[in-house]
Amino acid sequence: MYRLSELGTRLQNARQEKGYSLDELQQATKIQRRYLEAIEAGDFSKMPGEFYSRAFVKSYAEAVGLDPNQLFEEHADELPKPKPSETENLPPRTARSKPADGGARRRSGGASLLPTALAIIFVIAIGFAVWLFQQGNEASPEPGQGSDGNNVVVDSGDEPEENSEDTGADAEETEQVEENEPEDPAEEPANEEEPAPEDENEEEQEQQLAFTNESGNEFTYTLSGAEAFDVEMSFSGDSWLQILNGSGEELHQQTHVSGDEVSFDFSGENEVVFNMGSTATATIYVNGEELEYASDATRQYVIIQQENS
């Protein structure tokens, strides 16, 4: 049996002074009676989790007119300290996806060899064109031409015309080789390099909202690859809602009705807890993506933990 703790006795006396029964306090705080009894007895092992002990004590104190911050300071030795979540021990999603990234790098490395091979082909084609041009120059001189390239006067007037026709034909062939050969290799490297931006896009992370853990009526989800942490909620019926941050600080508490819509910016929070009175009438959107409840239970805690990118 747990004896009444100083903190529990103080809260119980304040409740009795207000004339509240445990059932009435349960309706006011939405905390189950067995948890209220555990707080008064100082038995925090019966809480759904150590994280919620401070949140429940705070709601109890506010309901009976006590200052929760003062209670936390004066009875710090009685309150359990929150422990890190199990999901914090999981490796980052980016670390688990390293093999896929390595494959992308190998693919991009293989593609980078293609421009080098095309450049070598281009150089060979230029060298071949130069060789053809030199062969044409060596074959074109006739005995009637001097070493300086100037024509020598000869008796026959037909031979210079034949030489000029042969030289013109060789020049046309050389020009065609120079015009046709370099064009294809020069254009192909530029076309082959275009898929590079696709590889860069493959490495970019997309937002993922995944269910990661279940403990009693607590359901934990991990948000990764997100630049923001914006939450919108819509209600199709009566639903009580309490929102806490990772330190147990209350950020919102209200009973919503059909047609209500609320939005929150939790960019500065690593963990947000939604104490849901009725999941059947409440819909949660995280950065525009609808959260799919892992359980059909009407009364549950939805915990969203943001993974640092």
Image (tube, rainbow, N blue to C red):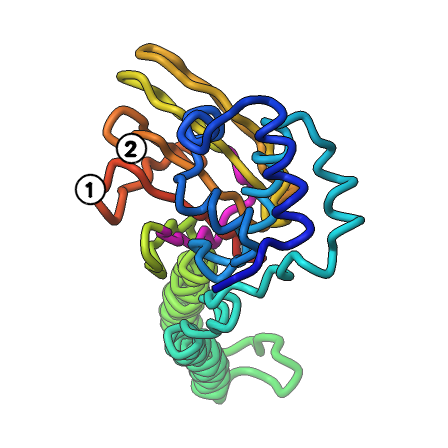
| Residue 233 shows in the view | yes
Q: Give the camera-side residue of 41 and 94.
A: 41
Q: Nearer the viewer, residue 251 or 299?
A: 299
- At 47% across and 64% down in the image, what residue appears? 1
Q: Which residue is more in the foreground, 177 or 36?
A: 36
In the rendering, at what x and y percent does residue 43 appear?
52, 58
Q: Mark 2: give few (<14), some (14-19) or many (20+) Cα within 10 Å.
A: many
Name the residue tied to disc 2: 279
Q: Classify mark 1: helix, strand or loop.
A: loop
Mark number for residue 270?
none
Rendered view: 156 above or below 282: below
Left or right, 221 with reference to 11:
left
Residue 86 sits above or below residue 78 on the image: below
- Whether 142 is drawn above or below 166: the answer is below
Mark 2 secondary-structure assignment: helix
Q: Is residue 216 magenta?
A: no
- For the question of whether residue 179 can be seen, the reply is no
Query: For the point 50% across and 84% down, which residue is it?
Result: 134
Residue extent of the magenta highlight: 218-230
Q: Disc 2 marks which amino acid? A: Thr
Q: Are marks 2 and 1 in contact (CB under 8 Å)?
A: yes
Q: Label 1 is placed on what type of residue?
A: Asp
Residue drawn at (46%, 48%) of the image: 304
- Quadrant into which the C terminus falls: bottom right
Mark number displayed over residue 296? 1
Identified at 46% across, 72% down, the residue is 90
